[in-house]
Image (cartoon, rainbow, N blue to C red):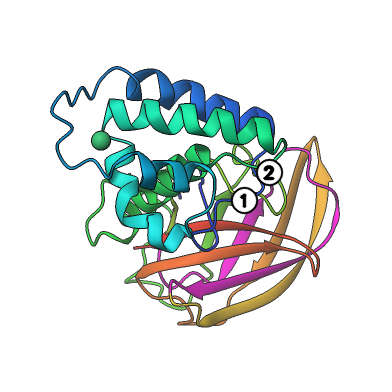
């Protein structure tokens, strides 16, 4: 079972980015945004009043939503937004910047849209050579979900643009390698549809062996068919969220 890097998210809110993460995103995106989208005739620009209201959080994100694509693909507007944003920050330090929120939202939309696409560019899972499914339909099928390189901060938005986890359908046993540095103890494991319908709720006890924190969870037969799901792992007070593709 081949599992790639995780990204996961919960809702479309931009929240809980650390200052360092925010800076990193802004640095990477800001450089090209300032330069790569010249729009000398200002085609499609919303005008400075709208940009200012977005930059200073006076406009709801739901209302600002229709401008986000433009603001992140028009260098003059992005410059305006950055300038208004700087002024706004001077007035109100510590708040997550609107441009960061805008970029994060666009990135989230893009990542989520990719995930929800029927045939997204996902990495093919390699077949387990020792598990001939047709011949032994009742045999225990174990899937390894390797979250070691996916170290989302608890309760924070996860890393962007990493492909979802993958596993085969009809799995009856999950081996979950938790993100590096995870504590031993009980974890809730839940799998829901992308609409939030709960398909699997289990509890696993994680143990550390040779630096690897892992746990096992049994899955009732035929619980999870092919499709797109959300894997949630956590406790009563926080959880990690990972997109999961079963096929
Ligand atoms: Zn513009």
- CA distance for labels 2 and 1: 21 Å
**Where on the image, by quarter, is ligand 1?**
top left
Residues under numbered marks 2 and 1 in contact, where contact means CB atoms less than 8 Å apart: no
Residue bearing the label numbered 1: 15
Residue 36 at x, y = what percent?
A: 25, 20
Task: Give the quarter of the figure containing the C terminus.
Answer: bottom left
Q: Residue at position x 31%, y 49% from top?
A: 67
Q: Is residue 41 visible?
A: yes
Q: Residue placed at 29% from the left, 45% from the top?
A: 69
Q: What percent of the width, then of the height, locates residue 111?
A: 38, 48
Q: Is mark 2 within 8 Å of ligand 1?
A: no
* Horizontal side of residue 68 vs 83, given as left or right: left
Residue 179: image tag: 2
Say what secondary structure mark 2 lies in. Answer: loop
Q: Residue 110 versus residue 87: which sits nearer the camera?
A: 87
The picture places residue 106, in percent across and down from the top left corner, at 38, 46
For the record, the magenta segment spans: 168-194
Residue 132 appears in which quarter of the rendering?
Answer: bottom left
């Amino acid at each position: 079972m081949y599992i790639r890097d995780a990204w996961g998210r919960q809702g479309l809110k931009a929240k809980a980015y650390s200052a360092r993460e925010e800076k990193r995103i802004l640095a990477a995106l800001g450089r090209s945004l300032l330069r790569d989208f010249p729009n000398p005739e200002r085609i499609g620009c919303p005008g400075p009043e709208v940009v200012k209201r977005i930059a200073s959080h006076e406009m709801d994100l739901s209302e600002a939503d229709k401008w986000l694509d433009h603001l992140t693909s028009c260098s003059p507007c992005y410059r305006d937004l950055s300038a208004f944003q700087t002024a706004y920050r001077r007035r109100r330090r510590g708040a997550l910047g609107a441009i960061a929120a805008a970029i994060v939202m666009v990135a989230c939309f893009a990542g989520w849209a990719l995930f929800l696409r029927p045939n997204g560019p996902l990495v093919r899972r390699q077949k387990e050579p020792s598990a001939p499914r047709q011949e032994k339909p009742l045999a225990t099928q174990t899937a390894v979900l390797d979250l070691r390189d996916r170290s989302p901060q608890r309760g924070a938005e996860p890393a962007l643009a990493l492909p979802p986890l993958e596993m085969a359908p009809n799995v009856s046993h999950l081996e979950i390698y938790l993100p590096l540095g995870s504590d031993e103890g009980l974890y809730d494991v839940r799998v829901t549809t992308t609409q939030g319908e709960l398909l699997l709720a289990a509890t696993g006890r994680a143990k550390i062996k040779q630096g690897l924190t892992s746990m096992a969870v049994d899955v009732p037969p035929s619980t999870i068919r092919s499709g797109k799901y959300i894997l949630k792992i956590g406790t009563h007070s926080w959880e990690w969220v990972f997109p999961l593709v079963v096929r």
